[in-house]
Image (spheres, helix red, strand yellow):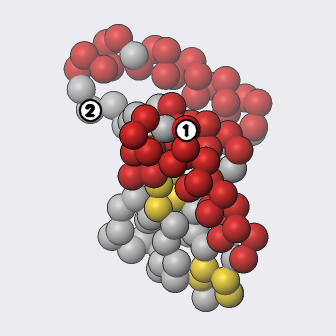
Amino acid sequence: MHLLERVLSTLPNIEASAIIAEEAGIHWKTIRRTAELVKYVTVHSPRSQGNFNFTAPAMLKPFAPFFPGSCHTGAGRQFAQWGGYDSYESYLLPRVKFTMISVSTSTGWSFNL
């Protein structure tokens, strides 16, 4: 979560979540780290607003229509990006695609465009 602290403190257009409880029980270590993350982002993000891009859902069922804390029961170890704007696709997509391929190669995760 140390990387996520820095990301949420500096990048304005990214969302993240950490599931703190599910039917199997409460994730006490995740709760503790989430509290540390929120404190860090409060101190280090402009106007403490980085925390608005983070949520800590509990007891969330798969495919629940709750954004940004949704979850799924898919294969895992995957990520995706959305590119719905022509200007975004023409300018940034090649750069984003390169980054995603780099991450995929280094982690073994698959990605979808």
Asked if 32 appears above or below 58 in the picture, the reply is above
Q: Give the image location of residue 13, x and y in percent.
A: 39, 36
Tell me if label 2 and label 1 are in contact, CB under 8 Å.
Answer: no
Name the side, left or right, on which 40 lies relative to 33.
left
The x and y percentages for residue 71 are: 49, 66
Q: Residue furthest left?
A: 86
**What residue is drawn where x is 70% and y is 68%?**
32
* Residue situated in front as seen by the camera: 27 or 87: 27
Dividing the picture into quarters, in which one does residue 105 lie? top right
The answer to whether one can see residue 83 in this image is yes
Give the SS element for disc 1: helix
- Cα separation between marks 2 and 1: 30 Å
Name the residue beneath numbered marker 2. 84
Q: Eyeballing the image, is 54 above or below 62?
A: above
* Amino acid identity at mark 1: His
Q: Nearer the viewer, mark 2 or mark 1?
A: 1
